[in-house]
């Protein structure tokens, strides 16, 4: 189901599910709440998960909240519904991917004594016309690979030569250590924005980069919602639009409960070890992660 722009009434997306009192909590005046735009997509997802349509609709558009001794329903805004939908999609996709990999490893496993060919496919450094969160993650890993390569191949060899009394020229090696520390802090700042829920924003994330992480020759903010990092392979400019949404995958308690009772998702639950449990304090589970 997709988050739409419509304004559903009280009780939209689940009614009295779980004995809750349906009302538009945490909304003021005529603030919009989300509704499903594509009913066919919602029905298809429910069929694949092995649950009723309304069972899936409720945690995508709302969640139960404990207020004093009463359980109420908080209706989601469009942004919150999109985050709920995407969090569920990411968790299911990751578990399905792990399940496929495990199956491939099982069926292709052979005796130790047999001959085999191993293939290592390393993704390359990316610098596209428009660079987003995915490129930042890929290039972060490539910086780590480059640093590991420099250390393993060049720095280690130099130490070995010197230990054996062999004279070698101390050529300058470009280290990625400073960039890696900076990118780690940037990703931590993105995690902080994700933990703010609907209050987190791409623009605040960009402003934080400018305030706390800009370093001459390594990182700088640009115009029109962009920032640049001077990687070992060259300067890459990233567009922050969508960063917070792409990095967020925490699920609230009702989504977790849905996953645990859906017949179609049962084969995936072992891949979620430990099975995500909701926090009693926040009503959500998991944490932002860089996939």
Image (cartoon, rainbow, N blue to C red):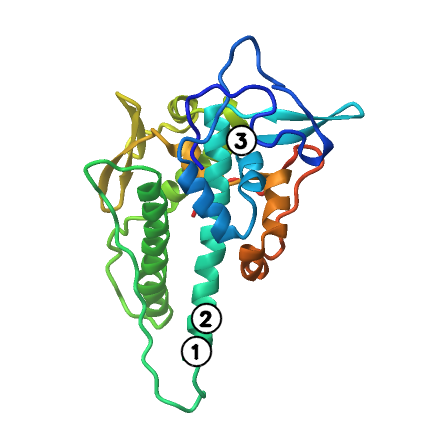
**Residue at 32% in and 68% down:** 120
- Could you tell me if the residues under marks 2 and 1 are in contact, i.e. CB atoms within 8 Å? yes
Q: Is residue 201 left or right of residue 119?
A: right
Place of residue 147 in the rendered image (x, y in percent of width and height, measured from the top left): 35, 53
Determine whether 161 is above or below 129 in the image.
below
Q: Which residue is mark 1?
A: 107
Q: Secondary structure at mark 3?
A: helix
Q: Nearer the viewer, residue 216 or 31?
A: 31
Q: Nearer the viewer, residue 62 or 80?
A: 62
The answer to whether residue 181 is seen in the rendering is: no
Q: Residues within 10 Å of mark 2 (few under 14, many from 20)?
A: few
In the rendered structure, find residue 103 and report the number of the disc placed on it.
2
Q: Nearer the viewer, residue 148 or 261?
A: 261
Q: Residues within 10 Å of mark 3 (few under 14, many from 20)?
A: many
In the rendered structure, find residue 152 and report the number of the disc placed on it.
none
Q: Secondary structure at mark 1?
A: helix
């Amino acid at each position: 189901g997709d988050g739409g722009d419509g304004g559903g009434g009280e009780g939209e997306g689940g009614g009295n599910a779980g004995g809750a009192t349906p009302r538009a909590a945490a909304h003021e005046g005529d603030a919009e709440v989300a509704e499903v735009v594509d009913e066919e997509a919602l029905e298809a997802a429910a069929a694949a998960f092995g649950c009723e349509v309304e069972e899936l609709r409720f945690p995508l558009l709302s969640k139960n909240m404990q207020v004093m001794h009463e359980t109420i329903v908080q209706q989601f805004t469009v942004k919150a519904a999109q985050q709920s939908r995407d969090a569920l999609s990411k968790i299911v996709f990751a578990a399905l991917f792990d399940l496929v990999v495990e199956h491939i490893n099982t069926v292709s496993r052979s005796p130790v004594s047999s001959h085999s060919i191993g293939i290592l496919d390393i993704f390359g450094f990316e610098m596209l016309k428009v660079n987003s969160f995915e490129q930042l993650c890929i290039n972060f890993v490539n910086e780590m690979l480059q640093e590991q390569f420099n250390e393993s191949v060049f720095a280690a060899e130099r130490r070995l030569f010197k230990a054996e009394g062999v004279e070698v020229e101390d050529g300058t090696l470009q280290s990625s250590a400073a960039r890696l520390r900076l990118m780690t802090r940037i990703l931590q700042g993105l995690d902080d924005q994700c933990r703010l829920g609907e209050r987190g924003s791409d623009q605040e994330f960009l402003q934080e980069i400018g305030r706390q992480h800009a370093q001459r020759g390594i990182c700088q903010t640009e115009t029109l919602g962009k920032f640049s990092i001077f990687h070992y392979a060259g300067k890459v400019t990233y567009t922050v639009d969508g960063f917070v949404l792409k990095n967020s995958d925490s699920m609230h308690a009702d989504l977790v409960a849905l996953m645990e009772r859906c017949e179609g998702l049962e084969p995936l639950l072992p891949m979620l070890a430990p099975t995500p449990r909701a926090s009693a304090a926040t009503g959500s589970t998991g944490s932002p992660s860089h996939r």
